[in-house]
Amino acid sequence: MRIAVIGGGYVGLVSGACLASKGHEVLIVEQDESKVAQINNGVSPIHEDGLEDVLMASLGSNLQATTHLDAAVRLSDLTMIAVGTPFNGNEIDLGQIEDASIAIGEALRDVNRYHVVVVKSTVVPGTTDDLVMPLIEKHSGKRPGLEFGVGMNPEFLREGNAVSDFMSPDRIVIGGIDERTRACMAEIYAPFGNTDKVFVNNRTAEMIKYASNALLATLISFSNEIGNLCSAVDDVDVVDVLNGVKLDKRLSPILSDGQRVQPEINSYLAAGCGFGGSCFPKDVNALRVYGQQRNLDMPVLDAVMQTNANQPLQMLDLLKKRQINLKRAQICVLGLAFKPGTDDVRESPAIPLIRTLVDSGAKVTTYDPVATDEAKKVLGDIDVTYAASMHEAIDQANVIMVVTSWSEFAEIPALIAPRAYQPLVIDGRRMLDQHAVMHYEGIGLGAQTPESGSDYDEHDHTGRMTSAA
């Protein structure tokens, strides 16, 4: 099938490249000429594992990027809208959706064949039917259901795993105004074999996306709230608590042969310093507002966001617990991306943490394997040192704060072991063995007995942690 994808960001680029790899002819429409040039040269403008390989496999044959929306739509059988829908503080901004819908309608005005327009962007229920479809109808002069179809096909892509998620989906949700629309959309996904396909109307498809993300965000905030409680209880560790919870056979079923299944959703039952990224914060807030606009209180989702907003502050509480003098402290913040595997720093807990540390007078050095350039755009002129390597970042630090669980950060215990003085390690992702470092604090870890190795001496005159006697 000939497909135009409007938007060359995370969703549009991954979706377009992967659909091309399945044999479809794909034109990716992107306004940014520099991004178009990158894509057509096989260079991904975003950090996403495996994406450049998928691009290179189809470029020059059935995949191309262009700035010309009108021509792309006219040449295609189906158009996907994959533009951004940012949350502006009150509701999601549908400006890009509106612009794309108008442009698609104008492009379809002189097209004399049936065409399907599919919304891939995350939008609240009713957007596809009540905004996108009327705009296309108005600007094309054509009738929905007769001369064009309108569908909704939400994405379930995790940044850092987007290519594998698209190529091996757990479900494909196909919404449409009628059977003809849904049948056309199903044809796109014919190469995906026996993957479960859910056929619904557009409003239901839109709601499935929001409900899915809201559930995952709720699991994280629940885990963080339990973790904060564990921090207040001596000799209790949230890691042990949640590991015990996850052994409930409703969460990790036991097969007839005695083997236990460990569903990936259980990874969201882990305490840390908060969730971020382009999806969870935006989508949960949008769903809250959507409910409030319908005179419905959303107390659970309100609590999810409040807990998440406070979570980076738990890292600061652990500093205060150790009576660190921030005006003398040399603090290393490891991780700027909101999660490993991506350069996305949107809503990353590292950003408010760094701002607060600098405002408090600390000397902050930070390092991230791929997200430094993106973080500089967000942090601006804040007085932060950006290290080129983890070794450089931790070299002079008397406090090391782990915010993103990049695998290379597991080397911290071995790197600091030879030091005459031992820095305090604050583990915001609970990825390190607490017994592998002399001075350790972690999210969800209650006060430990002396045998745990958590005793420490006061700071020396440099503000560094000294070895325990």
Image (cartoon, helix red, strand yellow):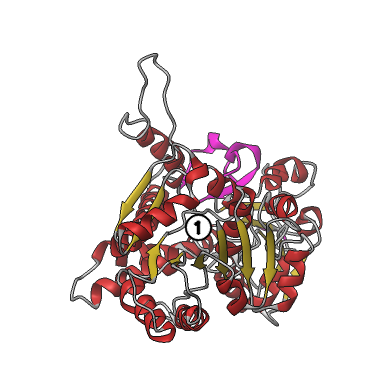
Q: Which residue occupies the foreground of this view, 360 or 42?
A: 42
Residue 42, position as x, y percentages in the image: 77, 59
Taking the spot 57% from the left edge, 56% from the top edge, the residue there is 159
Taking the spot 71% from the left edge, 49% from the top edge, the residue there is 422
Q: Secondary structure at mark 1?
A: loop
Q: Residue furthest top?
A: 257
Q: Which residue occupies the foreground of this view, 104 or 380?
A: 104
Q: Residue furthest left?
A: 295
238 lies above or below 145? above
Q: Quadrant of the N terminus?
A: bottom right
Disc 1 residue type? Cys
- Note whether residue 199 is visible: yes
Q: Which residue occupies the foreground of this view, 392 or 372?
A: 372
Task: Please state if 24 lies on the left or on the right of 331 as rendered.
Answer: left
Taking the spot 62% from the left edge, 61% from the top edge, the residue there is 26
Q: Is residue 429 magenta?
A: no
Q: Which residues are magenta?
A: 431-460
229 lies above or below 345? above
Dividing the picture into quadrants, the one containing residue 358 is bottom right
- Note whether residue 160 is visible: no
